[in-house]
Image: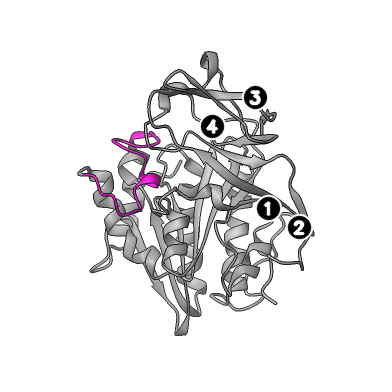
Amino acid sequence: MTNLKILNEVEEVQEGVPQYVWQFHGEEPGPTVTVMGGLHGNETVGIDVVEKLLAVVREKIKIGMVNIIIGNPAAAEAGKRFIDKDANRLWGGKLVNIPEQDRVEELKPFLAQSDLMLDLHSTIKPVSEPFLVVPSFDHELVDTIQTLGIRKIITGEGLKLPDNDPIESDLFTVANGGLGVTIEAGWQEDNNLVDKTMDSVLRALEEVGIFEKDSLAKHNQAEVVETFEIWNAYSAIFPRVNFQFPDGKEWQNYDVVKKGEIIGYENGEPVVAEKDSRLLFPKSNNQIVTGERACILLDMKPQYLDKDSLPLSVK
């Protein structure tokens, strides 16, 4: 993984910009794009992409502005997902008095001004197919999604909190008028994953005009997607009192729960699936926190859409 201390020494610290945030301006006005890695400190792919991206953007930017960010440098240096609290649950209006909240508050202005925000994540689990999380397609830059080379997309009301507090980076970006996209790139031990993710980001920057067309080498790591697999997140489970999954069960992404099947127990009372569903981002029982999402519920089957079909393009 990128050595952050060396990176911070090599990269010039910009006046008025927090540490581990770099801002690049083109010669002419244009969109503002933010690319962030390391919001979860043990997810190394995004951090490595940030290092590679700095040199390319510095040399190639023509219009607009690009913010390149290490989200949680303290956690990245420690090799942990977070130090005190998950930094990707701190973007809303309910503030807590911890250093990670201070870091998120430093970063909020950069995401709030972004027309497009790409938050780069990876997983330590070897079985992990790449996917995008897109809370809203309602943006003029939505066609950029097609350039990322990832066919599976999660969207829907189940991504939101019941009170609509935008606690995650993509939701915060959407709440401020931008297109927020989380890239779940896949297993970070995949030797090609940094290059694949880098190519996805470069193609997106080229698509929105940050770089001149064809100014970059042809990208051959990320696949060209013709048909997208859209999964609707229709709901989520937010524990209130002593929620646990049954018998210490370790649910996995896309595990099936049938209508009426017990998903877990809330203070000893069963919580059952209202319809045939699949689970996304299920936590282990020892990671469940009252009031924070324990899992997302997806429709049983995805919708398949051609790349030229709504909602993937603005007509």
- Using residue 187 as the reference point, say whether residue 285 is left or right of it: left
Q: Which mark is residue 282?
A: 4
- Mark 1 sits on what residue? 150
Give whichever of discs 3 and 4 has the lower sequence position. Answer: 3
The one nearer the camera, 183 or 50, is 183
Q: Which residues are magenta?
A: 78-96
The answer to whether the residues at label 2 and label 4 have Cβ atoms under 8 Å apart is no
Q: Nearer the viewer, mark 2 or mark 3?
A: 3
Tell me the mark number nearer the camera, choosing from 4 and 1: 4
Q: Nearer the viewer, residue 101 or 81?
A: 101
Q: Secondary structure at mark 2?
A: loop
Q: Earlier in the sequence, mark 2 or mark 4?
A: 2
Question: Is the image coloured rainbow, by chain, by secondary structure, or in one colour?
Answer: one colour
Badge 1 local density, few (<14 within 10 Å), some, or many (20+)?
Answer: many
Q: Are marks 2 and 3 in contact (CB under 8 Å)?
A: no
In this rendering, the count of numbered labels is 4
Type of amino acid at the residue the image marks with label 1 = Ile
Dot 1 falls on a residue whose secondary structure is: loop
Q: Amino acid at mark 2?
A: Val
* Residue depicted at x 70% and y 65%: 218
Category of crowding for the residue at label 3, using alpha-carbon neighbours closer than 10 angstroms: few (below 14), some (14–19), many (at least 20): some
**Residue 223 x/y as whole percent:** 74, 54
